[in-house]
Amino acid sequence: MYLNYKRFSLVFDPEHFSFSVLYSPEADGGEQTVVDQAFITMTTIDGRPLTTADFAAPRIDSGMETDRVWWRITCPGGPASTPEVAVLLSLDSRGARCRFNGRAVFSVRGGLIWGADPGKATFAVREEKSENPVLRASSGPAAPAGANALFDRLTDRIFRIFCEGTLRLRFNWAEQRYELGYRSGLDYGRELVFSVRENLMRDRFNLPYAPIRKAHGFAVPPVGWMTWYAVRFGASAEVVLANASELLRRFGAYCGRLVVWVDWEWCHRDWEGHGEPGADIFHPRRDPYPEGLAPVAAALTKMGLIPALWIGATNEGRQNAELEAHPEWVLGRHAMWCGQWWVDPSHPGVVSEYIPKIFRQVLDWGYRMIKWDCLPATLENACRFHDRFADPALSPAAALRQVVQAARRTVGDETYMLSCAGDSERDICCAMDSFDAARIGGDIFGWEEFIDQAVGRVLHCYAWHNTAIYCDADNLVLRDEFNNLEQARSRVSFYGLTGLPVTVGDAFAELDDRRTDLLRRIIPPVEAHPAELVRKRRGGRWQLVQLNVARPFGEWVAAAAMNLGGDEAELVIDLAADLDLECGNGRRYAVFDFWNRKFLGEFSTRLVVRAAAFDTVVLRITPLEAGVPAVIGSSRHITQGGVELLDFHWDPAAAVVSGTVLCAEGEVEELVLLLPDSFRIREASTPCRSSGRLAVLELTGSIAAPSGWRLELEAGDAAPDA
């Protein structure tokens, strides 16, 4: 049976009491199945199963109204407890609607097909306005309990499910698709509604939306070191290469691709913006770079690092030869920190000649990543001098977009381009579809800047992270000048669980071993995306960050409780309300404290954490299954398995638990398992210590060679507590 209304269709199978929903992405295009064979089952109010065989032959009525079409499937002649049930299936312009009536509890289970790459580019999200200040993220096809929609970042379309009752989405790894689970509850009339919204991000945030491009090769955000925050105007070729060597020594075992950013001081000596004789966008300052920038890039490349360069392509401190030869390209003169001469972004010559020449030179020098700064100042001066535009019909934003597009055409999709200086959404979003990443806030040195320009801005912008761009919350500055150890740990925890770019902002001479080790725990960044597509605001004293991790071998939550206040405090975390976890029905969670490497116990509804002033507690919260061993913690990465754990397998018949991990060369990685009550370790393939139900494996290896491990268990009491 087939029913259609505009772009939605229904197929109903009376024999199997199932339905499918179809959708036409284009008004004149073909249909695609989005709900695949959703089977309707029923139970009596006291839980006894019902089938269509318990009723007389169904009666199917149909109708057409001004704004909808419908079927009503009525099953009469049922048992005394449920004499009749009815299912109303209808279509309108917004989607498909299922209404269930009768003295029964209805359940619906079926496949959801949304997006061309469900495992990597379709995200289960909570699609509603959320006042909760918890920053919710996911890694992999995680579907937290509150998820009620599937967002396809490739097409900017969202498939939404509204229901009266309970809804649970899950990812089927074997089928590589999400699945729907719905239960109506005890009311006698409840609805399940499917709808589609096109251009969600474009319209909700007023963006020039395009899906994030990754032709540059960074499947996750980059890791590196930057001159400006670390050494400021003290940067030079020697300083860059010395710190590059330390970057490689300290983090080379943890990440295969490391970046060195030569920042704005290569052509600026101070904040006055008047320039230095002989230095401009085509010529670096002579004192710090006497041989130019190309030898620096060549040396970095030889070391196995990726050279990256700051560019302020729309302004100059002193007019360079190109601007002197083409005065018509100059828009006006207004001194700011970054320069005083502003080019006309509306001029055809700027777009076709000037900008391409700048960016070709960057590539010729050997730099493969670009940080494009001064965009807010460019828009400000384009407004100031708009009456001088060569093409006054263009708005400042439209003119800047064509300039950025010219640069993108010049460098190609393989070059990573970061837009810089995120004063507001105006400059962050203006040419978002041409950039790979965007600075979303101002400079971050002190703690208050971190709270405002990192935490606050990430909450505001996180819906765009790994959907349209990589959100870059600026450098991680950890040195004593700006942080105590607790504040450094909080900065690292926040970046690590949100999967942001990791750019070290300290000279390595000022970065002690403890802070170096903190950084190692978030390298490489985890692949993460938003679990809510909304702008959020920071709460009060505490900031919670939740990362839902889904891998073929299991799901868990890595969560950070950040104490932003100046004294020690205690926080009660409600697992359901705060972290979207399923509670009740005997569900239990093992909770492990990452930074303190301590098992906190098993919890079912809530837990209490204490944190020192400005400190952060990071937890792995793992659902437990009776009789099944579980990984509950890891020392290697803050996700505690999301980056380093490649496989985990339990063979109940042989009583063997095994897995594969990535280790960092030169470091012993501890993997923590919780064993069932009825088992003890008989033999381990790797050094292992046990205490009670805890087993701690000591693993070694390298990122180039995954390490396998195996525990053979046997029935018996666990090892006594140490």
Image (tube, rainbow, N blue to C red):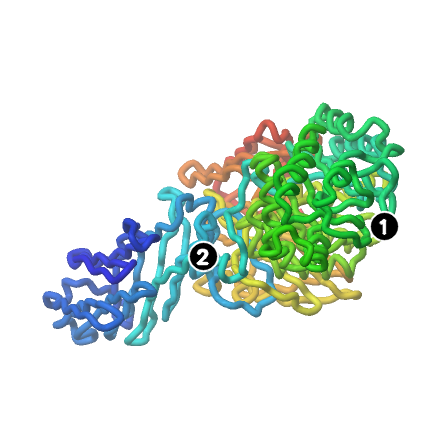
Residue at x 44%, y 45% (from the top left corner): 119
Name the residue nearer the viewer: 410 or 493.
410
Q: Amino acid at mark 2?
A: Asn
The reply to whether residue 683 is in sight is: no
Query: Which mark, residue 444?
Result: none
The quarter of the image holding the N terminus is bottom left
Q: Is residue 206 left or right of residue 20?
A: right
The reply to whether residue 708 is in sight is: yes
Report the residue marked by disc 1: 271
On the image, the x and y values in percent for residue 58 come to 13, 66
Q: Amino acid at mark 1?
A: Trp
Name the residue nearer the viewer: 602 or 102.
102
Pointer 1 or 2: first along the chain: 2
Residue at x 53%, y 37% (from the top left corner): 646
Q: Is residue 35 left or right of residue 639?
A: left
Q: Is residue 211 left or right of residue 351?
A: left
Q: Is residue 276 left or right of residue 219?
A: right
User: How far separated are the C-alphas under marks 1 and 2?
Assistant: 42 Å
Q: Within 10 angstroms of label 2, few (less than 14), some, or many (20 or more) residues?
A: some
Residue at x 31%, y 54% (from the top left corner): 24
Q: Secondary structure at mark 2?
A: loop
User: Does residue 284 lie above or below 462 as drawn?
Assistant: above
Q: Secondary structure at mark 1?
A: loop
Name the residue nearer the viewer: 387 or 182.
387
Report the residue marked by disc 2: 199
On the image, the x and y values in percent for residue 6 come to 27, 61
Q: Within 10 angstroms of label 1, few (less than 14), some, or many (20 or more) residues?
A: few
User: Does residue 476 lie above or below 182 as drawn?
Assistant: above
**Image quadrant in which you'd find residue 451:** bottom right
